[in-house]
Image: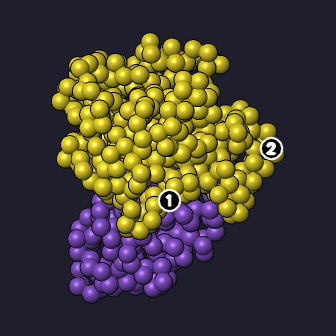
Amino acid sequence: MSMTITEKILAQHAGLENVVPGQLINAKLDLVLANDVTGPVAIQEFAKFSTKNVFDPTKVALVPDHFAPNKDILSAEQCKMMRDFARSQEIEHYFEVGRMGIEHCLLPEQGLTLPGDLIIGADSHTCTYGAVGAFATGVGSTDLAAGLATGEAWFRVPESMKFIFHGTDFQKWVGGKDLILYLIGKLGVDGARYRAMEFTGEAISALSIDHRFTMCNMAIEAGAKNGIIAPDDKTFAYLEGRARRSYPLYYSDKDAQYIDVQEFNVADIPLQVSYPHSPENAKPVQEASGIKIDQVVIGSCTNGRLEDLRLAAEILRGKKVHPEIRLLVFPGTQTILKDAMREGIIETLIDAGAAVSTPTCGPCLGGHMGILAKGERAVSTTNRNFVGRMGHVESEIYLANPAVAAASAIKGQIAHPEEVF
Amino acid sequence: MGKAWKFGHDIDTDVILPARYLNKSTPEHLAAHCMEDAGTQFAQEVKSGDIMVGGKNFGCGSSREHAPIAIKACGIKVVIAESFARIFYRNALNIGLPIMECPEAVAGISPGDEIEVDLATGIIENKTTNTQFQARSFPPFMQELIRAGGLIPYVEGRKKNA
């Protein structure tokens, strides 16, 4: 029977020959992850199981990244609770501050998310790992607790949607962020609800792994269960030196069934900006040009990787952040930060007037390190621009790629990168 | 019987429970800030047994289970929506917060209407307008999960029977 890559991974982990969309399965998990916000709730729920030990301490990852480094006493207690649990359960992949990064940048970098894996995470952006050909999806804390206790989770096999991006003639500065914002603009925030989003085509093959992470990261913003890209030579090159176990390769069959197939020419996709208060409000950046802003955030699990920082530095090199703008930069991991230092990126950003932070999810979810005041407006490379997401309920967020964000920081208003050259 | 609190489409979990309150997870703390950014006095005025009504894609966004915990801790008897975002849907069933999919009821309920809900049959009665609606039924597996009272009792029960 022909299947999609998503169906093949689910079938294999459920011990079945094949699966069909709508089928309810119980599947074995390769990795179970949580952070300092969702972890404590999961740990409390885990205590209600008769099992007292996690199913496999080598298949659990705990990352204190949301309100860490501890933003206040309550957050410190939450991080401590997760740290204590990690120690008592001898969790191998617990990442302490100083070694931690933003979970969805860190775990792939550490080679913990591999093609063909089945991963659940108590964080909605767990879908990021589809970029290396894993089935990865976000769950809540109780599902995570059950995963910790049993090493299994139930799934409804999702219908798959295929998105083919033709061509390799990207418009200047356009990247994975623009493709995914454009697509969410077409689909709406529930256009892929409960479904698998499979990205394919020449344009996807041409995208680097960093850009693919950005695309799969935002599959949840269309309501999807997972986003996925079939592994290729770029994937293998990325995994070289990272993967410490062998991995199976799955590819969608030519006659696999899709509930929807949509095709795009990448040449037709301009730089995107998503207006408040929904990622689906995507428009060409020119339409937003001139909107006055107060803050720019570059980083996060969506756009906090080396290529993102490189792009921002390319725009900001030799220029200054507008006097009325705060530019905050959040590298995804310590390795990314070090690589960016080595390449001179961090110096360029600081010379331009940026504040560069240790890795944290902080400002993306209005946690700490860059909260917006009433009436303030931000351009952000993060993933959500919901009401109150980055601070005051009357603040506003425009989502964009790092080049648009950097150009906007220079101009003090939303700008196309061409406007600053 | 309870009063209906009606919200729009795509109600995200940041609005249901803003991240600034995620540094503590006790149900009372979360309940006190439920729907704070939706521009209502919901948390202050909600009464035990009231009903929450939403449009399509209710509970989208962040996976934070704090959102359904907050709604449940407010005393909301059931959330009725046109459709639910998938993580919220799982979370609600897992923690024993009743949810119902029923676009007709959403269209037929106005804020403040008095609503009677039979969770066993899925019948929703609007006492203010004297109308009745039938919610979509759950697949058998999810009915079992609901009957067990959530994921943990379900998993533990299955282990005992194995």
Residue A58, x across and y down, in percent: 71, 32
Q: Where residue A237 is drawn, which disc sits there?
A: none
- Given residues A333 and A136, the one toward you in this image is A333
Of the chain colours in the picture, the one used for chain B is purple
Q: Secondary structure at mark 1?
A: loop
- Given residues B80 and A388, the one toward you in this image is A388
Callout 1 environment at 10 Å: few (<14), some (14 to 19), or many (20+)? many
Q: Which residue is mark 2?
A: A87
Residue under the image location 55 percent in, 57 percent down: A367
Task: Point out the image quarter for the C terminus of chain B.
Answer: top right
Residue under the image location 23 percent in, 75 percent down: B108
Between the residue at mark 2 and the residue at mark 1, the CA separation in whole angstroms equals 32 Å
Residue under the image location 79 percent in, 39 percent down: A90
How is this picture coloured?
by chain
The amino acid beneath tag 1 is: Ile
Task: Point out the image quarter for the N terminus of chain B.
Answer: bottom left
- Rendered image quadrant of residue A415: top left
Left or right placement of residue A323 versus residue B111 in this view: right
Front position among marks 2 and 1: 1
Q: Which residue is mark 1?
A: A371
- Rendered image quadrant of residue A100: top right
Of the chain colours in the picture, the one used for chain A is yellow
Residue B161, x across and y down, in percent: 66, 49
